[in-house]
Image (cartoon, rainbow, N blue to C red):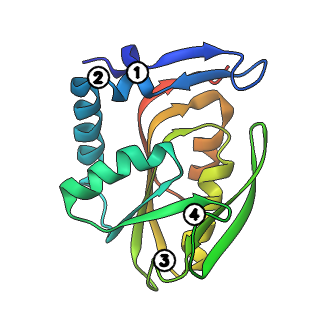
C-alpha cells in the first residue's frame, strides 16, 4: 500500500504559498490508517521507551492508537491554557507564526524515556519545543516518529543535528 496516495495536498492553505498535506484522507480510510499505525509500531520496535507523547492535535490521532496497542502511557503535549494542573510551558516559532505547548508537570518522571509522535515535521519548531518540554521534566527523548517528513524544510535534519533520532513513513517536499 502506498500511503502517499492517501494524503491530500491543498495549495495556499492556511495561507498563500503553503502546500498543506492533509492527513484526513488517510485516517478516513480504515485500511490506510491501520497500515499507518502498524508501520509506526514497526519503526518503534528498535527503541526503548516507557511513555508515548504526542503534539496537539493531529499527533494525538496516531499516538492514542499506538499507546493502546503497545499498552504504554500516553502523555498530551497541548496548546497553551488547555491543561488544568501545574504545567511546564515552552514558546516556539512555527512556519507561519508563534505558539506555546504545555505538559503537566507530573506526566514524566526523571530519566523516563519518551517517544514523541506527530503527524508531520516541517521546520521543526514544534518538535524542538516538544523535546525541550520533555527534558525540562527530567525525561529523555528516545526518538521522534512522524507520519510525514517535509524534507526540504529542514526540521528533520535539525533534529538529527541536535542528536535526536527520527523516523517517518512518508517524504514530501514542503512547498
Q: Is residue 118 visible?
A: no
Judge whether 86 appears above or below 151 on screen: below
SS label for mark 3: loop
Judge whether 83 appears above or below 169 on screen: below
Q: Position of residue 111 (x, y in %)?
A: 44, 82
Q: CA distance from mark 1 to mark 2?
A: 7 Å
Q: Residues within 10 Å of mark 4 (few under 14, many from 20)?
A: many
SS label for mark 1: helix
Q: CA distance from mark 4 to mark 1?
A: 28 Å
Image point 23% across, 27% down: which residue?
30
Residue at image mark 4: 131
Q: Position of residue 89 (x, y in %)?
A: 68, 70
Residue at image mark 3: 139
Quadrant where the N terminus sits is: top left
SS label for mark 2: loop
Residue at image mark 2: 29
Mark 2 or mark 3, whichever is nearer to me = 2
Mark 4 or mark 1, whichever is nearer to me = 1
Residue at image mark 1: 25
Sequence order check, earlier mark of 4 and 1: 1
Amino acid at each position: 500500500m502506498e500511503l502517499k496516495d492517501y494524503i491530500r495536498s491543498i495549495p495556499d492553505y492556511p495561507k498563500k504559498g503553503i502546500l498543506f498535506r492533509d492527513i484526513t484522507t488517510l485516517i478516513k480510510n480504515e485500511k490506510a490508517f491501520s497500515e499507518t499505525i502498524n508501520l509506526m509500531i514497526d519503526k518503534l520496535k528498535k527503541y526503548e521507551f516507557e511513555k508515548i507523547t504526542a503534539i496537539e492535535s493531529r499527533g494525538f490521532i496516531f499516538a492514542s492508537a499506538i499507546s493502546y496497542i503497545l499498552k504504554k502511557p500516553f502523555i498530551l503535549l497541548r496548546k497553551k491554557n488547555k491543561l488544568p494542573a501545574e504545567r511546564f510551558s515552552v514558546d516556539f516559532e512555527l512556519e507561519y507564526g508563534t505558539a506555546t505547548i504545555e505538559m503537566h508537570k507530573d506526566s514524566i518522571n526523571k530519566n523516563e524515556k519518551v517517544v514523541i509522535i506527530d503527524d508531520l515535521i516541517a521546520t521543526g519548531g514544534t518538535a524542538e519545543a516538544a523535546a525541550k518540554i520533555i527534558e525540562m521534566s527530567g525525561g529523555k527523548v528516545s526518538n521522534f516518529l512522524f507520519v510525514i517528513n517535509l524534507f526540504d524544510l529542514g526540521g528533520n535534519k535539525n533534529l538529527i543535528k541536535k542528536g535526536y533520532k527520527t523516523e517517518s513513513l512518508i517524504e514530501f517536499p514542503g512547498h
